[in-house]
Amino acid sequence: MATTRNIEVKVLSKKDSLELFCQEVCDETSMPGASVPRKLLINVPPLAIVTLVRTLRKKEEGVWIAVIQQLKKSMYEGLDPVNVSIKMSYDFFESSKIKLCFLLCALFPEYHKVTMDTLVGYAMVEDLLGDVEALREARGNLHLMVGTLVSSGLLLKGEDARYVMMHDIIRDVAILIAHESIMRVGLGLQKWPKLKEVGKCLRMFLMRNDIHEVPADASECSQLVTLSLASNKSLRKIPNGFFEGMKCLATLDMRGIGISSLPQSLSSLNNCL
């Protein structure tokens, strides 16, 4: 992200660490973490403190101590404590659906306003919303999952309930976690990306790039479930056979691209929304 001025965000002092911890915990005296030894928090970065505290709210004191000690150990080993804390928070979720919902929110550019209307489509394709009979019910289930992620500090609450956002650091970690997805959003990409493993990629998000050509044969994307080429205005033509090998594709977004006609293989996408 381009900036006019770079400011180093340092770890908090002992006093500031305790104050931040108390802001998150001390008002809730019933929270097990309220009795965690404060000395464990010295030199822990603020984002790491907030993320872990919000994730561990209902965990026993022993879990708090073990996690914070593990975090500090990672710092001594030279690992980024913020990244480690975010990954820990992600791992603590028992629901695989909430985990996937978190990763879906990382598909959009940093600090992008991820609207519930947009997210609900992706969530339905991934079968995250259960067996619902109405869109209102689907949105309700989505709001519950998103609310859990906001409470944990992994998502930022929008000015209204229609959207959420994700901190750029948290998004970077989410992208590392989502090894089955390719997320190249707004990077000025001009060519179709090469896959590390054929047939392994499930999601590909290439929005807001300058891709001008896609392969005539995309059979290496046979397991692809979601593809977004939105806002690639330089993409003027898609080969007729491009979609033939994408039998699993369920979500396709081609809004804002420059093609004048649709490829013939588009009709073979029987599962696509």
Image (tube, rainbow, N blue to C red):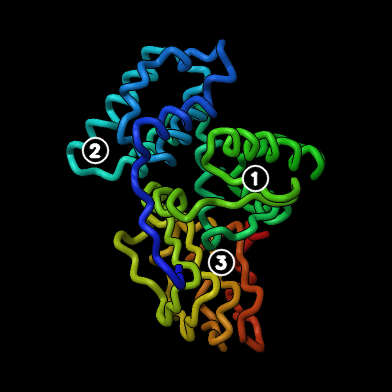
Viewer-closest of 226 and 209: 209
Q: What residue is rendered at 34% in x and 24% in y?
A: 67
Residue 116 shows in this picture: no
Instruction: Give the secondary structure at mark 2.
Output: helix
The kind of residue tagged 3 is: Ser
Judged by depth in the image, the label closer to the viewer, 2 or 3, is 2
Q: Position of residue 66 (x, y in %)?
A: 31, 20
Viewer-closest of 166 and 19: 19
**Which quadrant would residue 6 be assigned to in this image?**
bottom left
Instruction: Give the secondary structure at mark 1.
Output: strand
Q: Position of residue 50 (x, y in %)?
A: 47, 35
Gap in angstroms between the C-alphas marked 2 and 3? 37 Å
Residues packed near mark 2 inside 10 Å, few (<14), some (14 to 19) or many (20 plus): some
In the picture shown, does residue 140 fall above or below 92? below
**Which numbered disc covers residue 228?**
3
Residue, disc 2: 75
Left or right: 86, with 154 as reference point: left
Residues packed near mark 1 inside 10 Å, few (<14), some (14 to 19) or many (20 plus): some
Residue, disc 1: 157
